[in-house]
Image: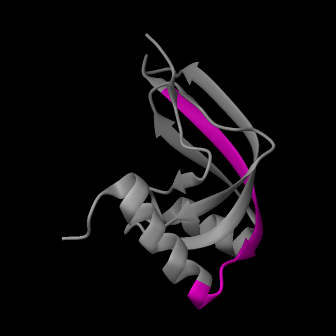
Amino acid sequence: MGFSTEFNSVCKFKNEQELHDLLEYGKCKMVKTGFRVYPTGQKVIAYTPQNQAIAIVKITASIAEINFQGKEVTLVEMDLLRKLTEEEARVQTALAYEMFFGDKQ
């Protein structure tokens, strides 16, 4: 059992509904598998499930726990600060592929 650290500039959604909630309501809770450490209080770039930069968010809470099914999960709560402009999204997406996601196929 251990914690894996997330990059301070990456918050990638795997679930379209969680992303929709963020964009619609300005807040959301994301559930990640395993114990992870998110930079609570920091601003990070949020990415869609398709690895596209979409917004700047502030991490407000990060709670690692074992759920009722006995699985290690991390709940991450965040607030939407603002959506990225098209140019910002394009640049951030290109940088993320180079730094985190690997080359585009």
In which image quadrant can residue 45 be found?
bottom right
Q: In this view, does 93 lie above or below 8?
A: below
Q: In this view, does 81 lie to the left or right of 33?
A: right
Q: Is the magenta stretch mostly helix, strand or loop?
A: strand
Q: Does the magenta stretch include residue 30?
A: no
The image shows residue 8 at horizontal and vertical percentages of 62, 45
Q: Give the range drawn in magenta.
A: 73-87
Q: Position of residue 63 (x, y in %)?
A: 67, 29
Give percent across and percent down for residue 72.
Answer: 46, 22
Residue ranking furthest to the left: 105
Q: Residue at x 53, y 38 (%)?
A: 6
Residue lying at the far bottom of the rendered structure: 86
Q: Residue at x 77, y 47 (%)?
A: 42
- Residue 3, can we see it? yes
* 4 over 54 or under it: above or below: above
Q: How many marks?
A: 0
Left or right, residue 69 beside residue 84: left
Q: Which residue is drawn at the image coordinates 68% and 34% (left, top)?
A: 62
Q: Is residue 52 visible?
A: no
